[in-house]
Amino acid sequence: MSRQSGIDMLFQRPDPANSGQFLNACGVNSKNLQINNNLVTEEVLVNCQDTSLGSAQISTTGAQSVTGSLSGIFEDDASGSAMADAAVSQTVLQGWKLVVPGWGDLTGDWNIGDFSFEGGITGSLNFSASIAQAAPLTFTANA
């Protein structure tokens, strides 16, 4: 197993000119992914025939959500504009992919939760955004 580079974690949009291909969302410098499994705790009898053995609490997975954050230099290319537009219009980024090197890809529809611009008198215009799955995602493990 080799060490993975954070630069290879990518947020990508579908390539409109090439079906099944993706283009990197340029300017994204920092990425974060969280897979949240809502644990459901229940109490069960250790042995229902001998209740003196007591009970135990067990946890099982419940609803899952996938969220993340992106930030970097805002580039007014198709990807940057699509993310800002989706935030303003409350629309879904359809068929986008989050690539996690050494693990796999999560592809599907994403909502933009928060989107902000930041810039000073000097330097670049920066952005930050939170993303969350808008529908079940397809996971493809690295080969």
Image (tube, grey):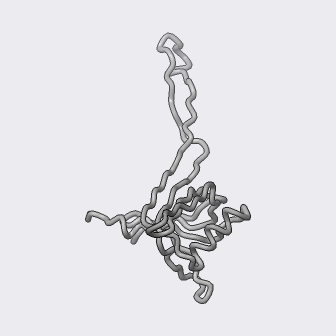
Q: Position of residue 116 (x, y in %)?
A: 58, 59
- Quadrant location of the C terminus? bottom left
Q: Is residue 102 above or below residue 14?
A: above
Residue at the far front in the pictured view: 121
Q: Is residue 105 visible?
A: no
- Quadrant location of the N terminus? bottom left
Q: Is 65 displayed left or right of 105 in the figure?
A: right
Picture residue at 60% right of the left edge, 85% below the top: 19
Q: Position of residue 25 (x, y in %)?
A: 51, 73
The total number of labels drawn is 0
Viewer-side residue, 98 vs 30 = 30
Q: Is residue 36 above or below residue 40?
A: below
Q: Position of residue 58 (x, y in %)?
A: 50, 30
Picture residue at 55% right of the left edge, 24% below the top: 44
Q: Quadrant of residue 17?
A: bottom right
Viewer-side residue, 45 vs 79 = 79
Q: Is residue 31 visible?
A: yes
Viewer-side residue, 45 vs 60 = 60
Q: Is residue 77 above or below residue 53?
A: below
Picture residue at 68% right of the left edge, 65% below the top: 92
Picture residue at 41% right of the left edge, 69% below the top: 142
Residue at the far bottom in the pictured view: 17
Q: Position of residue 61 (x, y in %)?
A: 55, 41
